[in-house]
Image: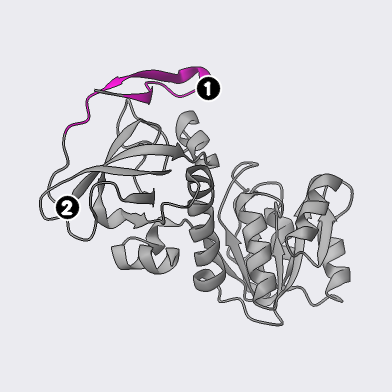
Amino acid sequence: MVKAIRVYEHGGPEVLKWEDMELGEPKEGEIRDKNKAIGLNFTDIYFRKGVHKAPTTPFTPGRKAFGEVIAVGPGVTGTKVEDVVAYARDLIGSYSEEQILAVDRVVPFPPSIDPIIAAYIFLKGITAQFLVRHCLKVESGNTVLVHAAAGGVGSLLCQWANALGAIVIGTVSTKEKASQAKEDGCHHVIIYKEEDFVAHVNEITSGKGVEVVYDSVGKDTFQGSLACLKPRGYMVSFGLSSGEPDPVPLSALAAKSLFLTITTLMPYISAGDELLETAG
């Protein structure tokens, strides 16, 4: 038996129950992992509240962690007991002391990496990678708009896009976050609670707009994000922290021939080699 957090009904933090759970032994192609650090993610709240549907009820939340391999199943090669691994999985279940995992869904880490740092950065890092290299391949000279620029993924997006030679515009909610976004590579920072970010982006770009908007906010920024795009620009929606946007007619995209993707990480790392490439 291991301890795990279980959810029997949707609701607030009070529905999280710490209890015993039977785990079993790893089967063909699986490992048993003892978690050293568990990463928290906003999508965990979506599952707890029922915004995202869990595959079963009750369920254990969580999609990322860092731990040590304590057992391997038949047919497992390249991974052994005492290896340290990180994982971000398409299924939930990381809020537990131990887990059974498919070996092709874990990524080896050097043992020198602090478990808390690894659990924190792994999912955010591979999310930033697919956003700047696969949704749209950001290039030198591009202008990009990143909402929630001081957040976990947002801060990495700003650093990465800056390193690629892009002009980075970030939106934040406070002056403190504005300072952080500047440190993380934003050339221009907009405090959206104090000014109209659409007007400011228009001013920064001399009316041309940006090549791509990375929007993890949703309802509060969606329409403005579309307005910030230049013709043939890319609207990349990858989060809904303020809720679902209002429906958008296709005709709203047609005037500037905009591209719109509502994206999540897992389809980009569905194969083991894709995961390793993205994490590499």
Image position, residue 139 (x, y; %) = 63, 80
- Amino acid under label 1? Pro
Name which residue lies at 48% across and 37% down. 44
Image position, residue 15 (x, y; %) = 46, 19
Characterize the local packing of mark 2: few (<14), some (14-19) or many (20 or more) Cα atoms within 10 angstroms. Answer: some
Q: Residue furthest front?
A: 112
Name which residue lies at 35% across and 49% down. 84
Name which residue lies at 49% across and 41% down. 39
Q: Is residue 235 magenta?
A: no
SS under mark 1? helix
259 with respect to 88 (left or right) = right
- Residue underneath mark 1: 13
SS under mark 2? loop
Image position, residue 183 (x, y; %) = 77, 59
Label at residue 29? 2
- Amino acid under label 2? Gly
From mark 1 to mark 2, how far is it between C-alphas? 34 Å
Between disc 1 and disc 2, whose residue precedes? 1
Where the C terminus falls, by quadrant? bottom left
Characterize the local packing of mark 1: few (<14), some (14-19) or many (20 or more) Cα atoms within 10 angstroms. Answer: few
Label 1 or label 2, whichever lies nearer to me, is 2
Say if 193 sits above or below 205 in the image: above
Residue 200 visible? The answer is yes
Q: Which residues are magenta?
A: 3-24
263 with respect to 160 (left or right) = left
